Amino acid sequence: MTQAIFLCRSEDLADSSRAVPFEVLYFGQSQAAFAVRYQGQVVAYLNRCSHVPMEMDYQPNEFFDLTGHWLICATHGAMYAPQSGHCRMGPCRGGLVKIQVSEADGLVHWHTSEKFQPAI
């Protein structure tokens, strides 16, 4: 059974701007995650590049490139499509690990699953 976990207010996420960070247990391991808004939609991913499993932000909570159209890994320059997490260029294997989110009544929630649980 899934559970909706409060993440932030809708106004905390502006298009192609700073992320809201959060922690999850991913298959029982504590992992950093982030949520961003792109073209009006909120998406969330583990903060882990698919090339080398390390955090991607180049400054705290900064993931978008200068155009505001790609999520970029600061270490090796891999670029990911914000809406899907798929790798578009650079060194990467596959895509980002997506976390289900929802937005209603001015609030954003992330959803637990078999893979994702609240961090302790």
Image: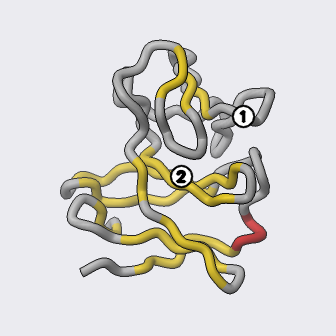
User: Residue at 46% of width from left, 51% of height from top?
Assistant: 33
The residue type indicated by label 1 comes to His
Q: CA distance from mark 1 to mark 2?
A: 16 Å
**In the orientation shown, which residue stands out farthest toward the bottom?**
105
Q: Nearer the viewer, residue 55 or 104?
A: 104
Q: Do callouts 1 and 2 mark residues in contact (Cβ within 8 Å)?
A: no
User: Residue at 51% of width from left, 13% of height from top?
Assistant: 90
User: Residue at 28% of width from left, 67% of height from top?
Assistant: 113
Disc 2, SS: strand
- 40 vs 2, left or right, is right
Q: Quadrant of residue 9?
A: bottom right
Tell me which label, 1 or 2, sits earlier in the chain: 2
Mark 1, residues whose alpha carbon is within 10 Å: few (<14), some, or many (≥20)? some
Residue labelled with disc 1: 69
User: Residue at 41% of width from left, 20% of height from top?
Assistant: 92
- 79 vs 111, left or right, is right
Mark 2, residues whose alpha carbon is within 10 Å: few (<14), some, or many (≥20)? many
Image position, residue 7 (x, y; %): 55, 71
Disc 1, SS: loop
Q: Nearer the viewer, mark 1 or mark 2?
A: 1
Residue labelled with disc 2: 34
Q: Nearer the viewer, residue 69 or 23?
A: 69
Quarter of the picture holding the C terminus: bottom left
Quarter of the picture holding the N terminus: bottom left
Image position, residue 82 (x, y; %): 60, 41
Position of residue 48 relative to residue 110, above or below, is: above
The residue type indicated by label 2 comes to Phe
Q: Nearer the viewer, residue 74 or 78?
A: 78
Image position, residue 8 (x, y; %): 63, 72
- 77 vs 38, left or right, is left
Position of residue 15 relative to residue 105, above or below, is: above
Numbered circle sitting on residue 17: none
